Image (cartoon, rainbow, N blue to C red):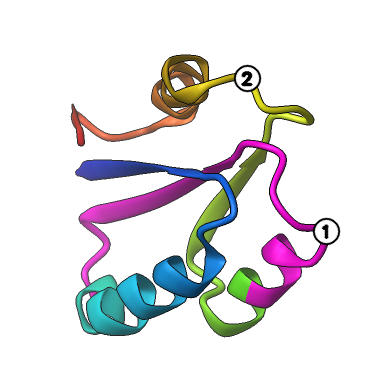
Amino acid sequence: MLSVVIVNYHSTPWLTKLFASVEQWYASENIEWIVVNNASGPNDQQTLQQHFPFIVWLEMGYNAGFARACNKGIEASKGDTVL
C-alpha cells in the first residue's frame, strides 16, 4: 500500500481540489491519504472529511513545522511506501 502524507497549513481550498481529482483512485484499497493539520482553520477537518471520508486526519495542535508534521504522518502511516 502507498501512504500519501500531506501537511495542511491554510491549504484547504487546494486540498479540496486535490482530493476531488484523486477520489476516483480511492476505490483501490492501495492508497492511504493522511492529512497532518499544522494549526489551520477551525473548520478544515469538518470541511474536508465531510466530502472525502477516506482521509486520515492527524492534528498537530500547533504549527510544528513541515518536517515534524511529515514525521507524524509517517509514524501513523500503514503503507509499505510513503510519499
In the picture, measured across the screen, residue 53 lies left or right of residue 60, that is: left
In the picture, measured across the screen, residue 67 lies left or right of residue 22, that is: right
Counting from the top left corner in percent of width and height, residue 65 is at 54, 21
Question: Which contiguous range is marked in magenta?
Answer: 27-47
Q: Point out which mark residue 42 bears.
A: 1
Counting from the top left corner in percent of width and height, residue 67 is at 42, 16
Mark 1 residue crowding within 10 angstroms, few (<14) / some (14–19) / many (20+): few
Dividing the picture into quadrants, the one containing residue 2 is top left
Q: Is residue 3 above or below residue 27?
A: above
Amino acid bearing label 1: Pro
Secondary structure state at the residue bearing disc 1 = loop
Q: CA distance from mark 2 to mark 1?
A: 17 Å
Q: Earlier in the sequence, mark 2 or mark 1?
A: 1
Counting from the top left corner in percent of width and height, residue 60 is at 69, 29
Write the residue at 74% across / 70% down.
46
Please say if the residues under marks 2 and 1 sit with CB atoms less than 8 Å apart: no
Question: Depth check: 66 or 72 in front?
Answer: 66
Whether residue 40 appears in magenta in the rendering, the answer is: yes
Amino acid bearing label 2: Ala
